[in-house]
Image (cartoon, helix red, strand yellow):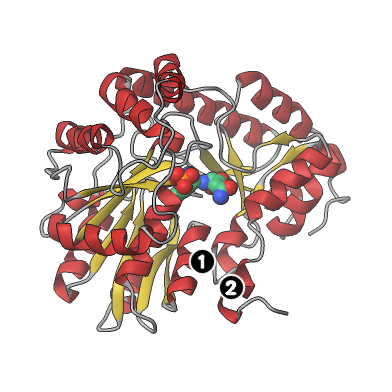
């Protein structure tokens, strides 16, 4: 086959696969993580205005100044992080391009990139494109949630490590890494003089009074962390593809060198609209996070009622469930069957891991959906009780 070796494991994404099955079977799609409601009206109007006002050509390479300034201001206000909007902030085509740009710009072929398992699929693909070597460090059970295997992290980081990718709040588990876990990551990065790529796209979507603590705020980390975030999840605009990264100038320049030959630029009229939202719509975001927390509880309860074991979700759009009480041990086969069987789509956690064993059964459900849709999914999933034994395992 003509496809290059390094991309062979990446011919399709689990999100596209499960969304296609959801459409085919008219299933409630709790697989791919996108919200089914629009973001703040003023932001949507700002985008329409930007198009009407002629902001339809290439924006500046690093992003429109208003957005870079708003990104810097938000990080100063929320976390006390100081970034110069001109030299330390780069607007990207979604967080996906920020991840790819960072890894392509900073990882020499053959060097290691350490990431937490389960890991968001784009990290593995970007490392493969860069010719780097993926090394994974697992999350392990911690009560009904998860925590970092710190010994495994210490063993994985060494002279071959180019970067550590840290995603908290974490997709797919909904874990917020504890302060002790973050402190250990920071300690090891400083000790080994390693760069951190902190994917914090769910920074605002934390529940139950939790407060997000960026990795860059830990001692010794501001000068070695590229912090990635974006508008997709915060403002319900996954189709706009507006992301950004912030960090020390040399790291931002490295990511920019790669980024400018991936897309050069993108999302011209959406950038001023997101700048407007970052400046004026953070109350909307805070109340959205509260609503999401309630949806997390609603779906978690529905999953428990349907017979799943349910893990604690502290943030993001996602909750992980254990279908073994229903007699299911293979989460991937289960997810492939689920849309046809009961009319619900989900995503197997095994799609995000190298070592499938601890994750083989686990299934991720997205709850950023209308309550009516969550309730409909709950009714459909309740049917699994009656279908026990017919399910693949
Ligand atoms: N990182 C994580 C952890 C994600 O869940 C996603 C999906 N929102 C991305 C990065 C990619 O973000 P974007 O859609 O802005 O490219
Ligand atoms: N980030 C979204 C998720 O985790 C999906 C993004 C995509 O489809 N690539 O579900």
Q: Residues within 10 Å of mark 1 (few under 14, many from 20)?
A: some
- Mark before the other along the chain sequence, 2 or 1: 2
Q: Which of 235 and 79 is in front in this view?
A: 235
Q: Which residue is drawn at 39% across and 54% down?
A: 264
In this rendering, would 276 be left or right of 239? Answer: left
x and y percent of residue 234 in the render? 40, 32
Mark 1 secondary-structure assignment: helix
Please identify the quadrant where the C terminus is shown: bottom right
Asked if the residue at tag 1 contacts the one at tag 2, i.e. Cβ–Cβ closer than 8 Å, the answer is yes
Circle 2 sits on which residue? 7
Label 2 vs label 1: CA separation?
A: 7 Å
Residue 352 image point, x, y percent: 55, 60
Note whether 193 is above or below 237 in the view shown.
below
Horizontal side of residue 188 vs 204, given as left or right: left
User: Crowding near pointer 2: few (<14 within 10 Å), some, many (20+)?
Assistant: few
Q: Which residue is drawn at 79% across and 42% down?
A: 339
Q: How many labels does the image show?
A: 2
Residue 79 visible in rendering? yes
- Residue annotated with mark 1: 125
Q: Where is residue 385 in the image (x, y as percent from the top left)?
A: 80, 38
């Amino acid at each position: 086959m003509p496809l290059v070796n390094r991309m062979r494991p990446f011919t399709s994404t689990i999100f596209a696969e499960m969304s296609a099955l959801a459409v085919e079977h008219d299933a409630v799609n709790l697989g791919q993580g996108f919200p089914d409601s629009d973001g703040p009206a003023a932001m949507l109007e700002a985008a329409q205005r930007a198009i009407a006002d002629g902001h339809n050509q290439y924006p500046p390479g690093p992003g429109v100044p208003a957005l870079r300034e708003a990104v810097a201001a938000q990080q100063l206000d929320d976390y006390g992080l100081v970034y110069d909007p001109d030299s330390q902030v780069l607007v990207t085509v979604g967080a996906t391009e920020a991840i790819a740009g960072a890894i392509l710009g900073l990882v020499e072929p053959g060097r290691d990139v350490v990431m937490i398992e389960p890991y968001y699929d784009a990290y593995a693909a970007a490392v493969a494109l860069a010719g780097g070597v993926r090394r994974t460090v697992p999350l392990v059970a911690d009560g009904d949630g998860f925590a970092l295997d710190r010994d495994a992290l210490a063993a994985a980081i060494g002279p071959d490590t180019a970067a550590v990718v840290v995603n908290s709040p974490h997709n797919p588990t909904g874990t917020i890494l504890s302060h002790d876990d973050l402190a250990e990551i920071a300690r090891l990065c400083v000790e080994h003089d390693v760069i951190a790529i902190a994917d914090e796209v769910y920074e605002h979507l934390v529940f139950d009074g939790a407060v997000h603590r960026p990795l860059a705020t830990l001692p010794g980390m501001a000068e070695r962390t590229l912090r990635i975030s974006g508008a997709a999840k915060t403002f319900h605009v996954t189709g706009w593809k507006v992301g950004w990264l912030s960090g020390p100038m040399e790291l931002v320049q490295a990511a920019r060198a790669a980024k400018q030959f991936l897309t050069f630029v993108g999302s011209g009229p959406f950038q001023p609209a997101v700048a407007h939202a970052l400046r004026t719509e953070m109350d909307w975001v805070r109340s959205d996070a509260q609503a999401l927390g309630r949806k997390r509880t609603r779906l978690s309860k529905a999953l428990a009622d349907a017979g799943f074991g349910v893990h604690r979700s502290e943030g993001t759009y996602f909750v992980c469930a254990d279908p073994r009480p229903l007699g299911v041990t293979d989460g991937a086969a289960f997810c492939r069957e689920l849309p046809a069987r009961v009319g619900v789509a989900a995503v197997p956690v095994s799609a995000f891991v190298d070592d499938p064993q601890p994750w083989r059964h686990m299934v991720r459900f997205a709850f950023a959906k209308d309550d009516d849709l969550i309730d409909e999914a709950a009714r459909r999933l309740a049917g699994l009780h009656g279908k026990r034994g017919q399910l693949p395992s």
